[in-house]
Image: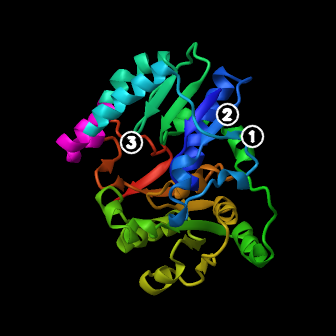
Amino acid sequence: MISKHMIGRLGNQMFQYAAVRAFQEKYRKNDEILLDFSEVYQRANEGFNEELRYFNVKPFKIGKMKLSFPQKIANLKLNIIKFYYLKKDPKNYAKKMYEVEKKLQPKMNKKGLYSFRLGYYDFKDCNCENCCFFGTFESAKYFDEIKDILMEEFTPKYGILEHNKELYKEIEKTESVCVTIRRGDFVSVPENKKDLYVCTPEYFERAIKLMQEKVPKAKFFVFSDDVEWCKNNMKFPKGTMYESGTDPVWEKLRMMYSCKHYIISNSTFSYWAQYLSRNDKKIVIAPKRWGNNLYKNEDELIDIYQDNWTLIDN
């Protein structure tokens, strides 16, 4: 069995599923995947849910992760260390835990425990009956080997919604540029402001100008969890089109990955839109700053950036 403790919304869930799906393909093709959404369900009042069900992913079990006794002891020790550093030095907590988790991985992996929050670690298989995964796994290195599989599995189960057919036609026939603007809980939840960084309007203005230089006939399509704010507070070129803001998440993602080029926010949902793009010659403009304390090439803490991205200040 391959078990994963799930956290976050769709973008986060896709990273976590992709990582364990790749592990399954590489090491344990005959093992089932169990996803534990108990923490996700606890935040249902915030709009969190199990959202992989809308896609053609390989069937998996949903249930409670069961740790063996050695796994429980190893996980308890790791949680004690996390609590200690969170209290002792919260400002440098992410960096310190990256170092700790990287150091502990060989011993943990032998017990069938895989816990890595930031960056990338090359996990190995173990002799345990149950492999238990914790963490976000926000690096394409975990799953690039099965990209073709993920391109199929992360397609929605449902057809294009009638009211979006004209928008799809525009996306298909133009040099469409997907502009993703993340606000929502990035700005509405006070505690998120410690870690999450909101891209400024100036970032998008610079990105649009740069995209127009690279793609002279660019047509922009705006996707956001606050479309009205974007219309009232942002400057976009004439002819820009907007997604309604009310489409289900699976429809929104498909429209986004149907575009040819991308200006993305520092969000996992934005990441998957460009990753699933069918355009091999896509141009992706992304923010240098992914979080309040996370930048590209800073002590390996973050490995979400891809080599073909153009990075600008945000």
Check residue 90 for magenta coloring.
Answer: yes
The residue that disc 1 covers is 58
Compared to 267, does 96 lie above or below? above
Label 1 near label 2: C-beta < 8 Å? yes
Which amino acid type is shown beneath numbered disc 1?
A: Lys
Query: Quick check: can you spot residue 246?
Result: yes
Instruction: Point out the frontmost of discs 2 and 3.
Output: 2
Q: Nearer the viewer, residue 14 or 240?
A: 14
The residue that disc 2 covers is 33
Label 3 near label 2: C-beta < 8 Å? no
Mark 2 vs mark 1, CA separation in Å: 9 Å
**Magenta span covers which residues?**
84-99
Q: Is residue 89 left or right of residue 152?
A: left
Mark 2 vs mark 3, CA separation in Å: 26 Å
SS label for mark 2: strand
Compared to 154, does 205 lie above or below? below
Q: Is residue 230 left or right of residue 242?
A: left
> Quadrant of the rendered structure where residue 34 is?
top right
- Residue 182 x %, y %: 47, 66
SS label for mark 1: loop
Give whichever of discs 3 and 1 has the lower sequence position.
1
Q: How many marks?
A: 3
Which amino acid type is shown beneath numbered disc 2?
A: Ile
Residue at the location (50% across, 58% down)? 43
* The C terminus, quarter of image: bottom left
* Furthest residue toward bottom: 232
The residue that disc 3 covers is 302
Check residue 86 for magenta coloring.
Answer: yes
Give whichever of discs 2 and 1 has the lower sequence position.
2
- Residue 97 x %, y %: 31, 35
